[in-house]
Structure formats: C-alpha cells, structure tokens
Image (cartoon, helix red, strand yellow):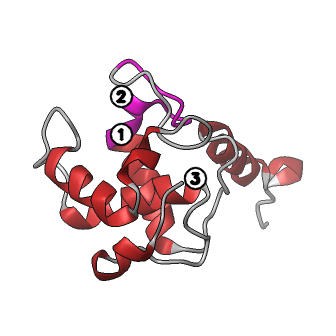
C-alpha cells in the first residue's frame, strides 16, 4: 500500500520559503543572479554581525551601509568600495573570505542600495563604471 503524505506535504517547502523571506525582509527569496544570491549568503554569514541583517547598522558599525544615509556613497563608485572591502573586510579577519566572496558581497550590497540591477554582474574590471549615490 503506497504511503501518502497527507494535507501537509508541501508545508515544509512553504515554511522554508517563508523563513528565507523573514531572514532578510525586502530581499527576493531566490535571486536569479547567482552573484547576488552568493553575496546575500556571504553577507548573512560574515557581514551582518557588524552591519546588521538589514544593512541598517549593527553592533560593529551603527550606520547604514545601503539605503537612506548609506555610508557606501562616500566611495563614489564600486571599484573604490571593492578595494576597501577586499583589503579590510571582514574587519576581524580580512583573510577569512576569498576575493570572489568579497566581490559577491559587494554586488549584494550595491544591489540592495539600488545601484546594481538584478541581472547585472559586478566585475573588478568594470566596477569603476558603477556609480554609487
């Protein structure tokens, strides 16, 4: 006799999708851009502890890093932000993340700030053309 899963068969998937949305409000649960999706994961693991899960500031850095009043605007363009990130982030151990992870995290931050579109890919050689306002 085949076993049926009953009326709650899809509940686990629904709960996991809801959890993803609640973890980072305003962030798509599944970004089509793999770089931004990777950046979101890197940000959650390595950046949110200081910058806050919503980028609004946290215990390590009280100012927002994206959105209104964002501190990243001082860099002018993505290349300068990327140099800073590669050299100094995460602040407790800049060697903890690969440069590729730092590039993805920077792309995610720029996406959340509204500078980098969903389909765009941030590349080191073109980062100077991405203006941060």
Question: Mark 1 or mark 3: which comes first in sequence?
Answer: 1
- Please indicate whether residue 68 sits to the left or right of residue 130 in the image: right
Question: Mark 2 or mark 3: which comes first in sequence?
Answer: 2
- The kind of secondary structure element at disc 1 is helix
Q: Is residue 109 magenta?
A: no
Dot 1 alpha-carbon crowd within 10 angstroms: few under 14, some 14 to 19, many 20 or more:
many
**Residue at image point 42% right, 76% down:** 129
CA gap between label 2 and label 3 equals 17 Å
What is the quadrant of the C terminus in the image?
A: bottom right
Q: Are marks 1 and 2 in contact (CB under 8 Å)?
A: yes
Q: Which mark is residue 50?
A: 2
The front one of 46 and 63 is 63
Q: Residue 8 at what x, y percent from top left? A: 83, 47
Q: Which mark is residue 47?
A: 1
Q: Are marks 1 and 3 in contact (CB under 8 Å)?
A: no
Which residues make up the magenta segment? Answer: 46-59
């Amino acid at each position: 006799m085949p076993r049926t899963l009953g009326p709650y068969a899809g509940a686990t998937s629904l709960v996991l999708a809801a959890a993803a949305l609640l973890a980072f409000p305003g962030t798509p649960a599944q970004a089509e851009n793999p770089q931004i999706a990777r950046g979101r994961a890197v940000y959650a693991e390595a950046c949110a502890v200081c910058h806050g899960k919503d980028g609004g500031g946290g215990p390590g850095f009280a100012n927002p890093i994206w959105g209104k009043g964002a501190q990243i605007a001082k860099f002018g363009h993505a290349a300068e932000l990327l140099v800073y990130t590669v050299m100094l982030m995460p602040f407790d151990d800049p060697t903890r993340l690969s440069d590729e992870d730092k590039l993805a995290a920077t792309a995610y931050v720029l996406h959340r700030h509204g500078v980098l579109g969903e389909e765009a890919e941030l590349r080191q050689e073109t980062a100077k053309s991405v203006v941060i306002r």
